[in-house]
Amino acid sequence: MNLEQLKKNIENDSNLNKYLRGVGKKSDNTQCIIFEDNKWLVFYYERGSKCALKEFDSEILACEYFYKKIKDSEELKKKICKNKNM
């Protein structure tokens, strides 16, 4: 998938918070994916710093990694919330 397909997948996935993602841009306190210095970067952006940075040469690999990462994160949040309510 490329960046445009990634945006559509996020928009169409009712389990994902569409507003807490930096797709194609840096956005504070969110997972981000951007193209910078001829590389695709996936990271968590907080207080002007890139945390847990992963670099890719391929847009496709970066987008697939980003999508899996945010899906896994949402699943984990649901499990934690479910366990708290028990």
Image (cartoon, helix red, strand yellow):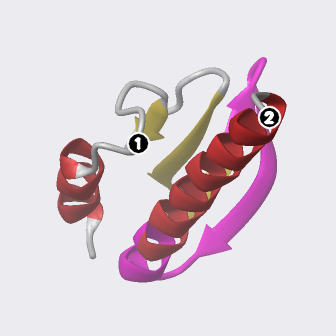
> Position of 86 compared to 1: left or right?
right
Is 83 placed above or below 57 here? Answer: above
Residue annotated with mark 1: 16
Residue annotated with mark 2: 86
Q: Earlier in the sequence, mark 2 or mark 1?
A: 1
Q: Amino acid at mark 1?
A: Leu
Is 39 placed above or below 58 here? Answer: above
Number of labels in the image equals 2
- Residue numbers of the magenta segment: 44-63
Badge number at residue 61? none
Q: Nearer the viewer, mark 2 or mark 1?
A: 2
Quadrant containing the C terminus in the rendered view: top right
**Are dots 2 and 1 in contact, CB under 8 Å?**
no
- The residue positioned 37% from the left and 79% from the top of the image is 60
How many residues crowd mark 2 within 10 Å: few (<14), some (14–19), many (20+)? Answer: few
- The residue positioned 52% from the left and 31% from the top of the image is 26
Cα gap from disc 2 to disc 1, whole angstroms: 23 Å
